[in-house]
Image (cartoon, rainbow, N blue to C red):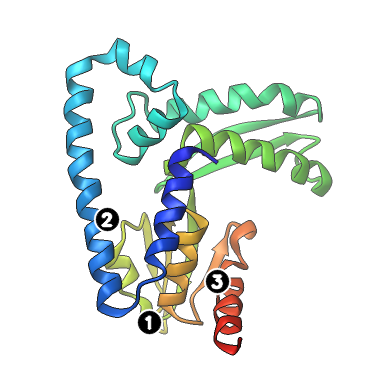
């Protein structure tokens, strides 16, 4: 986890302490500050030029800020390709490889090959390494697929979703970039008990776990 990730999660925890109108005001304050500092960072990026910017982007902290404000000098495709090249020697030790299929509507598509393909134990072994590499290089492609009830359709208007499918009961299936697991927890709690994560499997229980912790706090 990068320093930017840690700060983001701390902000989410602090925002979670507010409720009602106070929560809305606190979130508005955070967004206003992000826009203000993002505008300043954009001017710095423009002033320093590409060679120096490439050097600065090698720093984990600065890279996270550049990605956060969509100012990274290299495209998402380039960063994902570089990340996979770095992890391939490890995959080779498991007689496997990974193919970068593409980014479809903001969602990263990969295909495991060799021993990794079709073997649950090998897939689990390499999945963590691939995910860590991608998160470090291109956290902006981390997305979840959510099933939202009709009552939570506001999510598609309030946040930058990459894909929206309307179902027969008025509910939605959306692909949504997420800032952190903590942020996703808060969103699912607001969206209601019928909202759930369809993919990836590693985040499928986030909403249920958050609801159980909240219920336990009220019972204590």
Q: Which mark is residue 30?
A: 2
Q: Quadrant of residue 68?
A: top left
Q: Secondary structure at mark 1?
A: helix
**Residue 202 quadrant:** bottom right
Q: Which mark is residue 207?
A: 3
Q: Marks 3 and 2, Cα distance to the nearest angstrom? A: 24 Å
User: In the image, 88: left or right of 184?
Assistant: right
Viewer can see residue 177: no
Residue positioned 73% across, 26% down in the render: 90
Decide: few, some or many residues near mark 1? Use Cα within 10 Å; few <14, some 14-19, many ≥20: some
| Residue at the disc numbered 1 | 150
Q: CA distance from mark 3 to mark 1?
A: 17 Å
For mark 3, give the secondary structure: helix
Residue 209 x, y percent position in the rendering: 61, 72
Q: Residue furthest top?
A: 51
Please, what secondary structure does the residue beneath circle 2 have? helix
Cα separation between marks 1 and 2? 28 Å
| Whether residue 148 is situated above or below residue 120 in the rendered picture | below
Q: Residue at x 23, y 32 (%)?
A: 41
Looking at the rendered image, the disc whose residue lies closer to the viewer, 3 or 1, is 3
Instruction: Estimate the x, y position of residue 71 in percent, counting from the top left.
Output: 29, 32
Q: In the current view of this chain or complex, which residue is farthest to the front?
A: 220
């Amino acid at each position: 986890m990068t320093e930017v990730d840690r700060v983001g999660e701390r902000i989410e925890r602090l925002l979670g302490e507010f409720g009602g109108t106070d929560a809305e005001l606190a979130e508005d304050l955070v967004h206003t500050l992000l826009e203000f500092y993002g505008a300043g960072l954009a001017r710095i990026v423009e002033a320093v030029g590409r060679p120096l910017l490439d050097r600065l982007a090698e720093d984990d902290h600065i890279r996270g800020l550049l990605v956060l404000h969509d100012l990274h000098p290299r495209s998402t495709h380039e960063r994902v390709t570089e990340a996979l090249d770095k992890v391939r020697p490890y995959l080779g030790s498991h007689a496997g490889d990974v193919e970068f299929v593409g980014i479809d509507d903001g969602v990263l598509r990969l295909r495991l090959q060799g021993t990794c393909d079709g073997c649950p134990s090998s897939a689990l072994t390499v999945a963590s390494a691939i995910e860590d590499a991608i998160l470090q290089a291109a956290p902006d492609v981390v997305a979840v697929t959510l099933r939202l009830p009709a009552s939570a359709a506001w999510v598609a208007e309030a946040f930058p979703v990459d894909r929206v499918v309307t179902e027969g009961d008025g509910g939605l299936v959306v692909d949504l970039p997420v800032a952190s697991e903590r942020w996703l927890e808060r969103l699912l709690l607001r969206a209601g008990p019928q909202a759930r994560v369809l993919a990836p499997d590693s985040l499928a229980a986030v909403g249920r776990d958050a609801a159980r912790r909240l219920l336990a706090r009220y019972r204590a």
